[in-house]
Each structure stands twice: as structure tokens, then as C-alpha cells.
Amino acid sequence: MKATRLTVLFTLLTSTVLLSLPGTVLAQVVPDKKTVHCLSLSRIKDSEVISNRYILFRLQDNSTYVNVLSHACPGLNRNKAIMYRSSVGQLCDLDVITVLESASFGLMPGASCGLGNFQPIDEDGIASLRKAAKEGKL
């Protein structure tokens, strides 16, 4: 009987923690979409930082992908510039982005953080992510 109560308590606690994770917001706005590991650099039109874990990448064909970093990236926040490099012509989930910090002489490299998978996202999903970021939920 005690084991059953502990199992139920553990399940409830785990569910509560999982529901509070930022990834849950993403699951709500990008349900069942297929992720990709890489985007061709020549197809990327621009990027937009949503929060310290979420970056949008718009492609030449007007499709958009969201990348969720595995951990919060220090110094990365909305409207912050980022830099990335790749020698293979693709930006992949194993690549690293670097936050660009403002300095009196221009921009200088800040923290570097690893990317996650790229997930397609539509305009409604983008609006939901922006709203969640504005409300401090991401």
C-alpha cells in the first residue's frame, strides 16, 4: 500500500514539474511536427531570438523553424544578435551559436551555447511563443 502511495505521489510530482517546463509551451504551439537536424545556410533568410532558449530561423521559402536550446544561454535575450559558423554549409543541432554583446567599439563575442533540433512552426505558434516570452513563461 505504501509503495502505491509513493508511486502516485511521484507521478503527480513528476507531472507537475514536466508541465512547468518551457518545452511544454513549445509542445502546445508545435504539436506533432517533424524536427530536422540541419538547415542549409543558403536557405536561412534571418533569425530572431525569442528568449534565452528559443530562436526562430526564417527561410527563403518563408517557412520558419524554431530551435530550442537544451539549456538557457547566458546573455541571450530578445533582440540580441547571434553569430554562428559552419564549415559544411548547414546549421545543425550539434553547432554552437555565440551571443554578440554590445561594446563601446562595436560587438564582441559573449556566451556560446549549443543548438537543439529545428522544428517547423506556423504563424500562430510564433505568436504564442512571443506571448509566452513576453509573459516570462519561457
Image: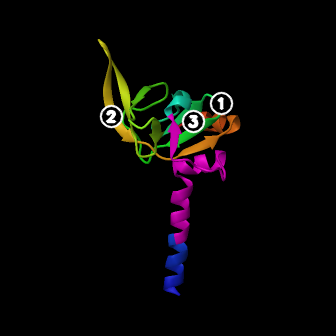
Residue lying at the far bottom in this picture: please name it: 1
Q: Is residue 24 left or right of residue 79?
A: right
N-terminal label among 2 and 1: 1
Q: Position of residue 88 (x, y in %)?
A: 42, 38
- Secondary structure under tag 2 reads strand
Image quadrant assignment for residue 77: top left
The residue that appears at 69% across and 34% down in the rendered structure is 123
Q: Residue 111, which numbered label?
A: 2
Type of amino acid under label 3: Glu
Viewer-proximal residue among 106 and 93:
93
Residue tagged 1 = 61
Observer able to see residue 80: yes
Question: Is residue 106 shown left or right of residue 33?
Answer: left
Question: What is the x, y in percent for residue 57?
Answer: 55, 33
Residues in magenta, as a range: 11-40
How many numbered marks appear?
3
The residue shown at (49%, 28%) is: 78
**3D distance between C-alphas at marks 3 and 1:** 30 Å
Q: Residue 26 colored magenta?
A: yes
Per the image, is 117 magenta? no
Instruction: Give, as a three-letter code, the residue at label 1.
Output: Asp
Query: As shown in the figure, which amino acid type bears the numbered disc 2?
Result: Ala
Q: Nearer the viewer, mark 2 or mark 1?
A: 1
Examine the rendering and report whether any part of residue 138 can be seen. no
103 vs 13: above or below: above
List the single residue furthest toward the right.
124
Which residue is label 3 attached to? 135
86 shown above or below 5 = above
x and y percentages locating residue 112 in the rendered image: 34, 36
Horizontal and vertical percent for residue 92? 46, 42
At horizontal 38% and vertical 35% (from top left) the residue drawn is 87
Residue occupying the far top of the picture: 105
